[in-house]
Image: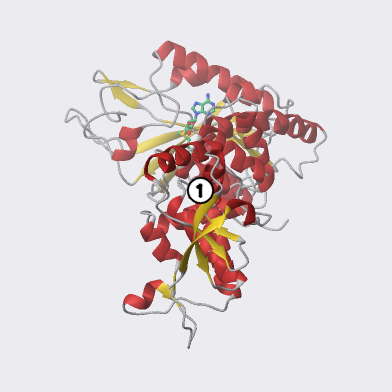
Amino acid sequence: MPKHVKRKISDITVPDGRRSIDQRKVQGLAESIALIGLINPISIDKNNVLIAGGHRLEAHKHLGRTEIKCVVLDCDELRCRLVEIDENLLRNDLDPIAIGEQAILRDEILEAMGLRAKSGGTGANQHKRRGEKSAPLQTTAGIAHEIGISERSLQICKQLARSLTASAKAAVRKIDAPKQDALKLARKNHKEQEVIAKKILNGKAATIADAICAVAQHKVKANLKSIARELATKKTKNVNRIVCGDAIEIMRQIPDGSVDLIITSPPYNVRDSSGNVRWGGTRATSKMRVGYDLYSDDMPRDEYVAWQRECLSEMMRLIPDTGVIFYNHKWRVLNLLMEDQSPIVEGFPVRQVIIWHRTGGINFNNSYFLPNYEVIYLIAKPKFKLIPGANGAGSVWRLHHDTDNAHPCPFPIELPHRIIASTAAKVVLDCFAGSGTTAVAAKMLGRDYIGIESSAQYVAMAEERLRKTNRKPA
Ligand SMILES: C[S@@+](CC[C@H](N)C(=O)[O-])C[C@H]1O[C@@H](n2cnc3c(N)ncnc32)[C@H](O)[C@@H]1O
């Protein structure tokens, strides 16, 4: 049994490198000690060196006491460190990062002591060396249980402690960020963490999500300058990016004639229409009910047509005399009358309409057949030509829709793949990039790409898909 003794406070040595003292905590402890006395004695070794109880010791000093109740532990240095850590974990109100730091230290010490958790039975939560006489030590999971958090939660605390940089930790602490948000920051590389943390530490963002978004917007501006520079000089080595921003605003910053091929599918402006597709409709699929991340898809028709015509004008400026635009849209039935997209494409050099025969579709109305196709307008400059043999694909394409994509309306990969493979385009643009399917197809075919997408969430989705895609060698 450890010995309980009283020691002069002036005789106790506090070793260097201990956790810093929280004066508010000392104040609270002093009040409680003055009222009910010291319930848990501090722990010291036989040389009067403090092992655990720094805050209690400070509280005694604060109260002007000269003596303190101690437990004298007879243990080697590593075991003493473990006792101190367990005290910190069990008695201190630590934040998740500090819990993680203490737990990591604990694991390291156990490892250094050659202790491993025993498996099976009640001993599963304990560490003990063969032949060891002193009380067995708990595993970190056992400690997690005692401090009332799950093992998974403890793993997250450790990941935060391990992966966050010093300023990212300061930022998380400054705004008392929820653990899951802190985890998003921890998954970024160190350079990104520093930039995001700076936004919070400078008071420019109040949450981690705000800071990530602000940094993404900042990146857009940095990216644009280099994209424009590279496109102007036809050196497209680093063009391949998904830019987070508005389609027209970004396209305006790209030089004339610098993109060979555009494949895009704008938002269809279908919310609240009556007929075949509705965001928010009770019978729509769940992905449709959710709609886009940021875009509400419910403009007045005139405004929508004007916006899309402006987009097409910008696209026309970006392609050279040999360039082409594949503009995907949908014809629908509105108030029992067919509404095609002539007002949008009127005056643009539409050379052909390709029918994308979808394998599914939704129809809430029994006054017309299920619309199971979409259209792709092939809008070409005079010198555009397909590569030899590509025209054999015909103009009705039966393509399954992509069910394995969290975006509400992605292209099936075969669609941009077929188009790109049918042309000699070097640089491919999708100005409504969504989950990045066009860019993925371009990369698969060894072409350069630029994607523009207004939602940072979809940009992240596209970047993730691109990371997993191998570029075909030139
Ligand atoms: C039909 S989806 C494109 C899906 C894409 N083809 C794919 O395979 O994932 C249209 C996309 O345009 C985006 N968007 C809406 N307004 C935008 C704007 N002003 N600028 C850029 N993107 C916008 C939406 O967030 C949406 O992801």
Vertical arrangement, residue 424 with respect to residue 207, above or below:
below
Q: Quadrant of the N terminus?
A: bottom left
**Residue 332 rendering spot, x and y as whole percentages:** 33, 26
Is 218 or 286 nearer to us in this picture? 218
Taking the view exactly as shown, the residue that stands out farthest to the left is 366
Could one spot residue 347 in this view of the protein? no
**Residue 271 rendering spot, x and y as whole percentages:** 33, 24
Q: Residue at x 66, y 31 (%)?
A: 220
Taking the view exactly as shown, the residue that stands out farthest to the right is 233
Could one spot residue 358 in this view of the protein? yes
Taking the view exactly as shown, the residue that stands out farthest to the bottom is 131
Q: Residue at x 57, y 27 (%)?
A: 205
Give the crowd class for mark 1: few <14, some 14-19, many >=20 residues within 10 Å.
many
Q: Is residue 19 left or right of residue 353?
A: right
Residue 174 occupies quadrant: top right
**Residue 151 rendering spot, x and y as whole percentages:** 40, 60
User: Which amino acid, mark 1?
Assistant: Arg
Vertical arrangement, residue 440 with respect to residue 300, above or below:
below
Vertical arrangement, residue 180 with respect to residue 471, above or below:
above
How are the residues colored?
A: secondary structure
Q: Label 1, on which residue?
A: 56
Is 21 or 242 nearer to us in this picture? 21
Is 436 or 8 nearer to us in this picture? 8
**Residue 318 rendering spot, x and y as whole percentages:** 68, 27
